[in-house]
Image (cartoon, rainbow, N blue to C red):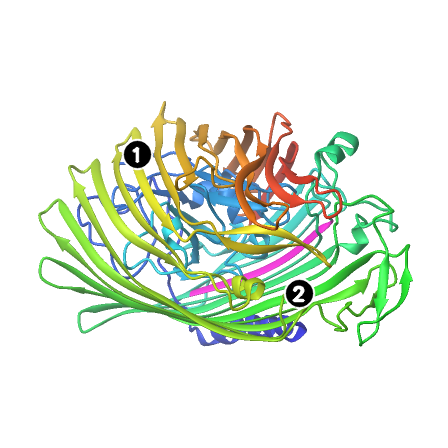
């Protein structure tokens, strides 16, 4: 995959320089205006333009530093997190999972600390990462193998202007995989109208530091530029992880006319870290909550045996214009991801008797052993995705006709080689192969849609629509993940027609309500074919129903909804022991029912203080059983006091509560059959974060701006289990993720 990393970086740099010099740039309305500073009175026009832009709440909304708010124009449960909270409520270089963690029904697990390492568990209403959709400026993205997202390998809060969390399936125009579980819509930051260079620096606990700078510049009278570059290093909360990260991002916006603009975005991210695989309760009791990786090369837990590097890029060119009374929004894109790793069979194992390497020759015959050496593997997995998202809109009769299509081809490759980690020598498998597996695969996605927003009255809009989803997965594996490994060529095409209908009633300028019904669909990920071979599983399908209401005034915003989701062909993971450690496989769990209630509100106590709260009840159980879906807490809530002063001071005190959940919902019995039952119960936990800072537009030494802030995560230093990480290979003990302890960080920025 080295060629992928080199070509990706070259593409970003060359394209950035070439486009900047040619002034070929653009505007994407996906930017970051405050939810409290909407530019149009809600209810004036409920039609949703085919051109995706930032979501606003209401021109009448209280001006507060709220972590999220429900927009009046929403046709499904929606929370919008604006640029001001992303900038002022979080530490510099936070990941997007840190941005969304306070929203209703959202849980995240970041065991290494905020903005450090990858998230080990992210869910919405109990749907796990891979069961909901994530987009960047309206473009869906994710790992081709299992649809997951390595949060630390993508966008920091420096380059994001807004995050929109749609907890419903969306309408026909909602493009992406797994839209039935909701959509996290990330929107890039727009160039500022005030040119300048802003330098920033962060320092904090666990030997954490970060430096960077962003640039806002007018390249011409029509073209603006925003660019950001940063470098970060940290020991992180978990010992031995040693995270290092570099990030570069560029966006140009060219306004050719009032209705025609061109946007160019490119970014590259590189991260190196030593990876942990969880911790047992006995290890926590013996070594403490910071137990991660150790310094003893005679055991599998040695940090030098468990390394990883992540490389990613995201590039697109977007055109918005009007042709013959049709609005046009088109984005052509290319994004890449590569994950290289060295890994012991079980990085949590500290027993020196659980080691030993057996050497085989190419005929699969054992030739020697090294009983004191540590066995493991080296692996690489990467994909290249290129595609196009086209959206059209046209006023037709008493409403707006929308149509569009998402096309993508994703080329994926991955391999794993057995290795003596003590000597660095590659070994042959006991089947006589140099590789444990060697897989190439391709995924083609085709999603056209049509939708009509019918304005029945001045206040009621009904939006029927239909989307067709077709996914073709092709695997061409010289060695597949089977026992014993064997070549596999397989191809499967999954498709379905997905109707939807929404109704939105605007009772007044401050109050609205909506109802929605939609069918959902998710093709089995390529990993299903890798592990199950030709015994393919049926696609997952859902029927989603929900009702909700939103209210927004100068002092009070409020949103509430109820939902019911009938889930069929639920594909769940289970762990099996293999020669290279525990591996995941997939089984069809039949069906499940998701249902719940969500509320969210912000109230202005004074002109400077506001109170924010949300609460959600989320029940997810397998049909005809009392077995709860794993990693799906029944209750979540958040409570916050927010301050936004007149003299440049700001602050927030935010608490997040997550009720108990189960780590797994199935196991394998003595006969090798999958049995559904709950285990590894994770108790409820609560964490409180604090932020306080000062910002002025008149900095020292004649500078154009200055800010300083302190961010304290988990201010009360609570130690709790937050997620399940699997089982140890030899002992079978449950492994867990924990809540990182108190983290104190200081951020300073200055604009020149």
Q: Residue furthest front?
A: 671
Q: Is mark 2 on a helix, strand or loop?
A: loop
Q: Residue furthest top?
A: 605
Q: In this view, does 329 lie to the left or right of 310?
A: left
Quarter of image, res 330: bottom left
Q: Position of residue 198 (x, y in %)?
A: 55, 52
In front here: 290 or 255? 290
Q: Position of residue 741 (x, y in %)?
A: 66, 32
Count of numbered circles in the view: 2
Residue shown at 32% from the left, 41% from the top: 564
Q: Residues within 10 Å of mark 1 (few under 14, many from 20)?
A: many
Q: Is residue 577 left or right of residue 393?
A: right
* Circle nearer the viewer, 1 or 2: 2
Work out whether residue 409 can be spotted.
no
Q: Is residue 284 left or right of residue 370?
A: left
Kindly report the secondary structure that dominates the magenta region of the rendered protein: strand
Give the residue pinned by disc 1. 560
Question: Quick check: 87 above or below 450?
Answer: above
Quarter of image, res 692: top right
Let me know if residue 249 is in the magenta part: yes
Q: Marks 1 and 2, how far apart in space?
A: 50 Å
Work out whether residue 395 can be spotted.
yes
Q: What element carries label 1?
A: strand
Give the residue pinned by disc 2. 483
Q: Is residue 21 left or right of residue 209?
A: left
In front here: 64 or 239? 239
Residue shown at 30% from the left, 42% from the top: 71
Start and end of the magenta stretch?
Answer: 242-252
If you read the primary sequence from the N terminus, does the residue marked by circle 1 or circle 2 appear first? 2
Residue shown at 47% from the left, 37% from the top: 627
Let me know if residue 445 is in the magenta part: no
Q: Position of residue 667 (x, y in %)?
A: 58, 44
């Amino acid at each position: 995959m080295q060629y992928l990393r080199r070509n990706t970086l070259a593409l970003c740099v060359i394209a950035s320089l070439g486009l900047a010099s040619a002034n070929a740039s653009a505007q994407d309305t996906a930017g970051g205006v405050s939810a409290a500073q909407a530019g149009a009175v809600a209810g004036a026009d409920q039609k949703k333009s085919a051109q995706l832009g930032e979501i606003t709440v209401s021109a009448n909304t209280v001006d507060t530093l709220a972590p999220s708010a429900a927009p009046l124009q929403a046709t499904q449960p929606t929370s919008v997190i604006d640029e001001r909270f992303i900038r002022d409520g979080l530490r510099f270089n936070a990941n997007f999972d840190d941005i969304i963690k306070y929203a209703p029904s959202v849980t995240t697990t970041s065991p290494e600390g905020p903005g450090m390492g990858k998230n080990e568990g992210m869910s919405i209403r109990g749907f796990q990462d891979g069961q909901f959709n994530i987009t960047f400026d309206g473009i869906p993205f994710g790992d081709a193998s299992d649809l997951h997202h390595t949060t630390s390998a993508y966008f920091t809060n420096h380059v994001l202007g807004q995050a929109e969390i749609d907890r419903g399936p969306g309408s026909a125009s909602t493009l992406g995989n797994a839209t039935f579980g909701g959509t996290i819509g990330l929107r890039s930051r727009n160039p500022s109208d005030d040119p300048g260079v802003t330098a920033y620096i962060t320092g904090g606990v666990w030997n954490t530091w970060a430096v960077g700078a962003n640039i806002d510049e007018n390249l011409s009278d029509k073209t603006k530029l925003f660019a950001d570059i940063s470098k970060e290093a940290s020991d992180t909360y978990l010992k031995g992880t040693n995270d290092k990260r570099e990030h570069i991002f560029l966006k140009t916006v060219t306004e050719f006319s009032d209705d025609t603009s061109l946007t160019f975005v490119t970014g590259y991210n590189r991260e190196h870290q030593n990876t942990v695989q969880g911790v047992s309760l006995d290890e926590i009791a013996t070594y403490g909550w910071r137990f991660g990786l150790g310094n003893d090369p005679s055991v599998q837990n040695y940090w030098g045996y468990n390394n990883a590097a992540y490389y990613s890029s995201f590039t697109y060119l977007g055109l918005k214009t009007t042709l013959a009374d049709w609005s046009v929004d088109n984005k052509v894109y290319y994004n890449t991801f590569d994950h290289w790793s060295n890994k012991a069979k079980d990085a949590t194992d500290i027993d020196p008797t659980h080691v030993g390497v057996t050497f085989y020759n190419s005929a699969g015959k054992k030739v020697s052993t090294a009983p004191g050496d540590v066995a493991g593997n080296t692996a690489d997995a990467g994909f290249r995705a290129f595609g196009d998202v086209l959206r059209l809109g046209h006023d037709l009769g008493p409403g707006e006709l929308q149509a569009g299509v998402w096309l993508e081809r994703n080329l994926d490759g991955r391999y794993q080689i057995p290795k003596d980690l003590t000597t660095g020598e590659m070994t042959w498998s006991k089947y006589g192969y140099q590789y444990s597996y060697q897989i190439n695969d391709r995924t083609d996605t085709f999603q056209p849609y049509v939708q009509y927003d019918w304005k029945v009255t001045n206040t009621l809009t009904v939006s029927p629509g239909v989307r067709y989803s077709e996914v073709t997965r092709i695997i061409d594996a010289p060695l597949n993940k089977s026992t014993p490994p064997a070549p596999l060529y397989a191809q499967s095409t999954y498709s379905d027609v997905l109707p939807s209908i929404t109704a939105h009633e605007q009772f007044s300028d401050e109050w609205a309500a909506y109802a929605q019904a939609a069918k959902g669909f998710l093709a089995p990920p390529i990993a299903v074919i890798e592990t199950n071979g030709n015994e393919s599983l049926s696609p997952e399908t859902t029927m989603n129903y929900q009702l909700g209401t939103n209210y927004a005034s100068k002092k009070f915003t409020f949103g509430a909804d109820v939902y019911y989701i009938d889930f069929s062909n639920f594909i769940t993971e289970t762990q099996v022991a293999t020669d290279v450690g525990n591996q995941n496989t997939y089984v069809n769990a039949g069906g499940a029912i998701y249902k719940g209630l969500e509320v969210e509100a912000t109230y202005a106590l004074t002109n400077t203080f506001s109170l924010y709260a949300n609460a959600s009840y989320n029940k997810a159980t397998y049909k005809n059983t009392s077995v709860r879906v794993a990693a799906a807490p029944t209750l979540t809530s958040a409570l916050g006091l927010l301050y936004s002063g007149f003299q440049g001071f700001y602050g927030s005190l935010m608490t997040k509560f997550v009720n108990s959940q189960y780590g797994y919902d199935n196991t394998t019995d003595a006969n090798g059959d999958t049995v559904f039952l709950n285990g590894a119960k994770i108790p409820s936990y609560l964490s409180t974060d604090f932020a306080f800072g000062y910002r002025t537009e008149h900095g020292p030494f004649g500078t154009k701006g200055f800010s300083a802030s302190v961010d304290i995560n988990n201010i009360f230093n609570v130690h709790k289990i937050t997620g399940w990480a699997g089982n140890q290979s030899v002992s079978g003990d449950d492994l867990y993720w924990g809540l990182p302890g108190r983290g104190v960080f200081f951020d300073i920025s200055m604009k020149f």
